[in-house]
Amino acid sequence: MERLVDSYGRIARKLRISVTDRCNFRCSFCMPREPVWLSTSELLTVEEIARVVRILVSMGVTRVRLTGGEPLVWNGLESLLRMISGIKGLEGVSMTTNGFLLAERAERLRELGLRGVTVSLHSLKPDRFEEIVGVKGVFDRVLAGIKAAKASGLAVKINCVVVRGCNDDELEDFAKLAHSSGVTVKFIEFMPFDGERVWSLDRVVPGREIVERLRKSYGLQEKHRERGSTARYYGFADGSLGEIGVISSVTEPFCFDCDRLRLKCDGKLVPCLFSRDEYDVKHLLRSGATDEEVARYIREVFLLKFRGVEELLRKSYIPAHIRPMHTVGG
């Protein structure tokens, strides 16, 4: 099929799928403490998600990331991996997870075709971490999940959302972890997708500030940026295998070559994370539409993709809240 291109000439190559809105954590910058879950009938089935993946791969998408909510609490995860991991043209399937249920499942997921996991770890201090995620007694299990994922052969990365006055005093500790363990630690600027609606620009720690702080201790060296990458990556001057990634979605957005499309668990397509625009593909999937008709609809709505955060910055306006992150996936 014809490639999926928006009105700015950006080509879709990556698909992020929120397979469920449910999660066993309550991270304040992702979801409200008392969320209202979607009913089962509102959610896409495993077969419907797999069908959308097949259609999008035929349109040029080559990478899929499974997100949530928390994908490991979703009963259809293994079935979906089984269905999509062998699709011709799909180069890799990865997953973002809070890691709580990862230790006992990492090996099986790798066998089913998962190639990498990104684990959310927002503090290395157990008490602080558990306050952030809203659940007690989970820190050690998350660390065990990271260890098991590495042992299974999965590529492992760590995500840390940096919030000023919360965990910005731990940047050097996370860099030390990356340096000593060989993993990639990605620092993410705090974005207006929090469940408690407390986001404000003064709580954002700019990516440039993060890099400059860590350069003093580790002599970071910037690596070549892959086209469409959400992060800029930095190696350590002494050649350590670990690396630092910085996602500056708010202060230095990368909209000019964005190649992502999101599918929510309720069947809504989200071409741009920072836009409230959503387009329902579920009604087509359930009304007898052919793959060609579904593809035509996706092509039409992708043409409407918002220019991105760069446009918001040009107008000196970033909304204080767009949607809770757990409803669309990271």
Image (cartoon, helix red, strand yellow):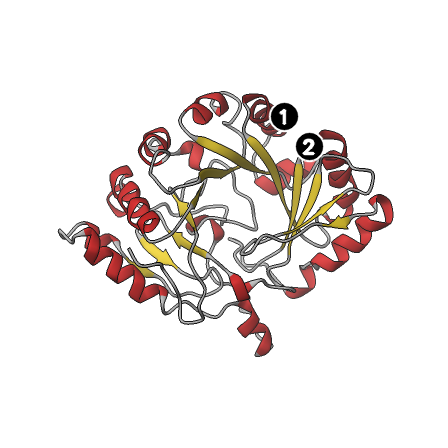
Tell me if mark 1 has few (under 14), some (14-19) or many (20+) residues whose alpha carbon lies within 10 angstroms of its own: few
Q: Is residue 200 depicted above or below 226 in this figure? A: below
Q: Which residue is mark 1?
A: 140
Q: Position of residue 111 (x, y in %)?
A: 43, 23
Q: Which amino acid is tagged 2?
A: Pro
Identify which residue is drawn at 70% across, 60% down. 206
- Residue 126: image tag: 2
Residue at the left extreme, as displayed: 288
Residue at the right extreme, as displayed: 216
- Residue 202: image tag: none
Secondary element at tag 1: helix
Identify which residue is drawn at 82% across, 50% down. 215
Name the quadrant of the N terminus.
bottom left
Q: Is residue 86 depicted above or below 60 in this figure? A: above
| Relative horizontal placement of residue 289, taking residue 115 as reference (left or right) | left
Q: Position of residue 286 (x, y in %)?
A: 17, 49
Q: In terms of depth relative to the viewer, which is nearer, 54 or 17?
A: 54
**Do the numbered discs 2 and 1 sit on residues whose CB atoms are within 8 Å?**
yes
Q: Answer with mark 2 or mark 1, whichever residue precedes in sequence.
A: 2
| Relative horizontal placement of residue 110, taking residue 175 as reference (left or right) | left
Q: Position of residue 67 (x, y in %)?
A: 45, 42
